[in-house]
C-alpha cells in the first residue's frame, strides 16, 4: 500500500525538511520500517534500544490513535495517512523534598 | 580546522514572554505548568513570537496514565511531572501554522527545583526544539534556562537565551 507519513517539526531535520514522506507497507509497522530505512537518523528518536516504539511516540492512522486499533499491526489501505504525534512530557527530579533542610 | 557552530545558535524571546512564563508557573504552583513556544527559525535564531499555555494532563491522572504511564506513580504527580494535552497541542499547532508560526520549543516549571533538566526530561525529549525550564520557588519565579537535546540523546546542551525588550518584525512578513 502506498501511504503518506506526516513528520512532526522536531524530526524534519532528518527528512530533508519535508513535512510528509511517501512510503509503502501492508501494516503500520511496515510503513514505519520503510520510513526509517529511507531516513535512518529518525530511528533513535522513534524506537528505544530494544527496537520498540518509544512510549512518548504516538502514531495516528487517519486521525485514529493506533493503540485503539490493532497497534502497529493495523493493516493499511492505499492513500492512508499516518501521523507521528509527539507526546510532550517532562518534569523535575523527584525525591528532593526528602533532602530538604530548614534554612 | 573545522569549526563546530550549531544553528540556530540561540533562543530569542522578550521580557514579556519571560514574565508570562513566570506568571503561569506561579499561578499553577505547586504543580508544574507547561506551554508551547510559537515562532520561527531564522537560521541564526529561534525567535519566539507567542506563547500558548497548555493544560498539564497529569492533573487528570487516569487520562494521563493511559497516554503515558508513569514508572513510579508513588513518586510522580503533577507536582513533578507534566504531560501536555495532545488535543490542545494539535489545535495550537494547526492554528499557529495558519499564521506562519511553528512550534519551536516548550516551556515548563520546576516547582522548588532548579532549572536543570531532569533525567525524565531527557528521556522524553525531542531533538531540535528548545526546552525552557523556569524554577518556581515557594510560588515565585526563580532562575530559568533553555536546553536542547544532544544529537545522540545522551544529554541536554545549554542553549543561549537572547532576551530582548522588543522584537524586530519577522523578515519574511
Ligand atoms: Zn523538567
Image (cartoon, grey):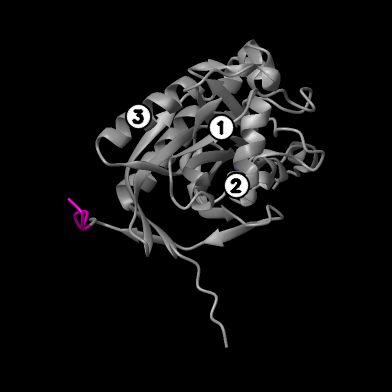
Instruction: State the image coordinates of residue B66 (x, y, percent, origin top left).
Output: 66, 16
| B140 w.r.t. A63: above or below | below
**Closer to the camera, B114 or A31?**
A31
**Closer to the camera, B50 or A72?**
A72
- Residue ID at (63%, 57%): B151
- Residue ID at (53%, 25%): B56
| B129 w.r.t. B77: above or below | below
| Magenta portion: prevailing SS class | loop
- Going from N to C along the chain, the mark reached first, 3 or 1, is 1
> In this figure, which residue is indicated by the disc labeled 2?
A38
**Closer to the camera, A83 or B171?**
A83
Q: Is residue A48 visible?
A: yes
Given this view, does label 3 or label 1 mark the residue nearer the observer? 3
Mark 3 and mark 1 on one chain: yes
- Residue ID at (48%, 41%): B106
Label 2: how many Cα within 10 Å (few below 14, some 14–19, many 20+): few
Residue A77 left/right relative to A72: left
In magenta stretch: residue B19: no
**Closer to the camera, A17 or A27?**
A27
> In this figure, which residue is indicated by the disc labeled 3?
B94
> In this figure, which residue is indicated by the disc labeled 1?
B32
Instruction: State the image coordinates of residue B154 (x, y, percent, origin top left).
Output: 72, 55
Label 1: how many Cα within 10 Å (few below 14, some 14–19, many 20+): many
Residue B52 left/right relative to B31: left
Question: Disc 3 is attached to a residue of which chain?
Answer: B
In the displayed orientation, state which residue is furthest to the right. A50
Question: Disc 1 is attached to a residue of which chain?
Answer: B
Residue A67 placement: quadrant: top right
Question: Disc 2 is attached to a residue of which chain?
Answer: A
- Residue ID at (45%, 29%): B27
The magenta segment: B168-173
Mark 3 and mark 2 on one chain: no
Amino acid at each position: 500500500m502506498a501511504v503518506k507519513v506526516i513528520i512532526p517539526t522536531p524530526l524534519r531535520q532528518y527528512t530533508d525538511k519535508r513535512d510528509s514522506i511517501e512510503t509503502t507497507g501492508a501494516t503500520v509497522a511496515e510503513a514505519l520500517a520503510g520510513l526509517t530505512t529511507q531516513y535512518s537518523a529518525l530511528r533513535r528518536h522513534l524506537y528505544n534500544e530494544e527496537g520498540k516504539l518509544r512510549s512518548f511516540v504516538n502514531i495516528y492512522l487517519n486521525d485514529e490513535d493506533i493503540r485503539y486499533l490493532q497497534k502497529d499491526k493495523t493493516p493499511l489501505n492505499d492513500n492512508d495517512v499516518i501521523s507521528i504525534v509527539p507526546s510532550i512530557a517532562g518534569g523535575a527530579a523527584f525525591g528532593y523534598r526528602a533532602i530538604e533542610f530548614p534554612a | 580546522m573545522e569549526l563546530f557552530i550549531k544553528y540556530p545558535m540561540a533562543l530569542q524571546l522578550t521580557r514579556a514572554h519571560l514574565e508570562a512564563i513566570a506568571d503561569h508557573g506561579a499561578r499553577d504552583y505547586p504543580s508544574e505548568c507547561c506551554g508551547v513556544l510559537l515562532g520561527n527559525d531564522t537560521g541564526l535564531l529561534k525567535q519566539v513570537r507567542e506563547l500558548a499555555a497548555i493544560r498539564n494532563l497529569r492533573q487528570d491522572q487516569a487520562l494521563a496514565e493511559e497516554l503515558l504511564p508513569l514508572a513510579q506513580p508513588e513518586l510522580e504527580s503533577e507536582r513533578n511531572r507534566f504531560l501536555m494535552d495532545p488535543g490542545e497541542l494539535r489545535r495550537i499547532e494547526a492554528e499557529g501554522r495558519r499564521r506562519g508560526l511553528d512550534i519551536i520549543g516548550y516551556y515548563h516549571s520546576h516547582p522548588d527545583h532548579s532549572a536543570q533538566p531532569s533525567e525524565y526530561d531527557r528521556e522524553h525529549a525531542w531533538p531540535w526544539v528548545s526546552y525552557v525550564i523556569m524554577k518556581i520557588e515557594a510560588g515565585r519565579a526563580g532562575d530559568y534556562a533553555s536546553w536542547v537535546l544532544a544529537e545522540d540523546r545522551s544529554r541536554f546542551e545549554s542553549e543561549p537565551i537572547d532576551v530582548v525588550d522588543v522584537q524586530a518584525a519577522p523578515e519574511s512578513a
